[in-house]
Amino acid sequence: MLAEKFFLLLETLRSQVQAHPDGSPVIVSTARHVPIKLPNGTGK
């Protein structure tokens, strides 16, 4: 029964998540980090 409640909670959270136009979820990270910008291109 606990597993059923867990899956119901996950489904509820999934249904309330905002999504991009293509249907992919919006990910918001709360991790503490310094954002970096990677160079464009495939040069090595």
Image (cartoon, rainbow, N blue to C red):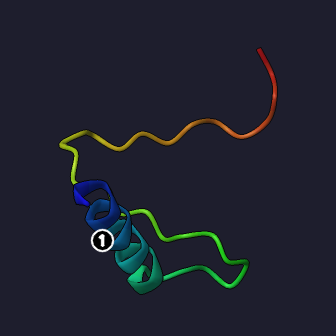
Give the x, y percent position of residue 16. Answer: 40, 85
Quick check: 12 above or below 42?
below
- At x 57%, y 37%, the residue is 38
Q: Nearer the viewer, residue 44 or 17?
A: 17
Which secondary structure lies at badge 1?
A: helix
Q: How many neighbours does mark 1 have within 10 angstroms: few (below 14), some (14-19), or many (20 or more)? A: few
Q: Is residue 20 above or below residue 3?
A: below
| Pick the front one: 11 or 27 | 11
Quarter of the picture containing the C terminus is top right
Quick one: 4 or 35, which is closer to the camera? 4
Q: In the image, 1: left or right of 15?
A: left
- Residue at the left extreme of this rendering: 32
Q: Is residue 3 above or below residue 7?
A: above
| Image location of residue 30, percent across then percent down | 22, 54
Give the residue number, with chain letter if any, for mark 1: 9
In this picture, residue 31 sits left or right of residue 10: left
> Where residue 39 sits: x, y (%)?
64, 36
Residue at the image point whose x is 35% and y is 72% from the top: 8
The amino acid on which the numbered mark 1 sits, given as a three-letter code, is Leu
Q: Quadrant of residue 32?
A: top left
Q: Quadrant of the N terminus?
A: bottom left
Query: Quarter of the image holding residue 20?
Result: bottom right
Residue at 46% over, 83% down = 15
Q: Position of residue 33 (x, y in %)?
A: 24, 39
